[in-house]
Amino acid sequence: MIKFVYLDRHWAMIKKHYNKDLDELWSQGRVVYEDLKVVDLIKQHINRKYVALTNSCTDAITMMIQASVKPGSEIICPAYSFYATAHAISRAGCKPVFVDVNHNYHLDLDKIKLTTKTKAMLFVSLFGNPMNYAEVLKYCKTNDIICLEDAAQSFGSAYGTHKSGAVGLASALSFSPSKPSPTFGFIGAVATDDKDLFEHVADAKKHGVENGEIGHNSNPASAIVLQLQHSIELNEICQQHRNDHASTYDMQLGDHVLLPQRHEKHNWSKYVIRTDKRDTLQKFLHKQGIETKIHYKKLLPSYKMYHKHRIYPIANELSETSLSLPIDAWMTNNECQKVCDAIKEFFS
């Protein structure tokens, strides 16, 4: 079986040093993460001044919005993304305004319709493919709206001089089993250069006691934070492995499927192909012992919570044709080749 995620192999790489560090940590009775070096590692990686860890990226987006946008405001977001993008906007008391995407899976700036209630944009570099950050920043500045980044899938990506996680007023990061820096659980983070926003989030994730607001209980335990620390320390090696797998797919599959477009530095959080035969291809690969995923079958506006009847033609097309191939850092070159061979066999 060729797995979509190889957490077992990742664990084999980190367990010796992780277990030693965890034993030392817990032997001292330390259960909070503030004095671990992972926060500094993240800040160095993305060039942000402040980072606050949370229990999830959903919490991070929610608190990031609560610290910068008034309840009742409209926030622009893509119609095609993971559910948390829209859910967090709603949790923060704001209204998501869905916009169609382009074939890069990016929010289409030309299709945005602003109103007097539009106060912010929450953009997503989906699958690790970075948007043109300079264009996003220019659009938000020109239209006097706050720029917020959902960087859940793009930690390590960059476009020009801009690194994902360091674009706009604040960014939300995600670390979980399927992410480039995997953890055996879920962690989020708010990254910003704005001290006031950081302090607001730092208080909000501890119930909001100081600000006198209803806050959250969103403090990740030291054990999972320590996992993240060890994962980030392996980030460069893992990124090179994913780059190699992506290059193999690029070279061998272009005659059979539509390949993901490369924009600047792609972290290959997902390698997503497109084909009208998506469903039958996925079934064929499953029979060959190859695990794939569909990201995503359902558009955000179609969820019961929103149930918007507008048509989003590109997003709808992508939801019906996109298939994510395994590209885990610990997948072997031989396994990657087997995926290529199986896809070529299907189309032969």
Image (tube, rainbow, N blue to C red):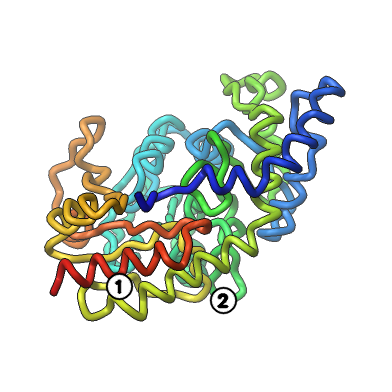
Note whether 80 is above or below 223 in the view shown: below
Q: Residue at 30%, 60% (x, y): give it.
A: 112
Label 1's element? loop
Residue 127 coordinates in the image, percent (x, y) = 41, 58
The residue at 28%/51% (across/down) is 289
Which amino acid does the dot numbered 1 rest on?
Leu
User: How would you rate the neighbour count of disc 1 (Cα within 10 Å): few for under 14, some for 14-19, many for 20 or more?
Assistant: some
Horizontal relation, residue 257 to residue 161: left or right: left
| Residue 108 in sight from this viewpoint | no
On the question of residue 128 being in view, the answer is: yes
Q: Secondary structure at mark 2?
A: loop
Q: Quadrant of residue 220?
A: top right
Observer-nearest of 218 and 11: 11
The amino acid pointed to by label 2 is Gly
Vertical relation: 251 (above or below) 332: below
Q: Between disc 2 and disc 1, whose residue precedes?
A: 2
Measuring from the top left, give residue 84's x and y in whole percent.
40, 39
Q: Which mark is residue 160?
A: 2
- Residue nearest the viewer, comparing 244 with 204: 244
Is 160 left, or right, of 53 in this rendering? left
> Mark on residue 47?
none
Tell me: 328 left or right of 321.
right
Name which residue lies at 50% across and 49% down: 179
The C terminus sits in image quarter: bottom left
- Which residue is rendered at x = 68% and y = 30% of the image? 223
- Going by the image, does 154 lie left or right of 101? right
Nearest to the observer: residue 27 or residue 218: 27
**Residue 318, horizontal then vertical, whole percent:** 22, 59
User: Badge 2 local density, few (<14 within 10 Å), some, or many (20+)?
Assistant: few
Which residue position holds label 1?
Answer: 259
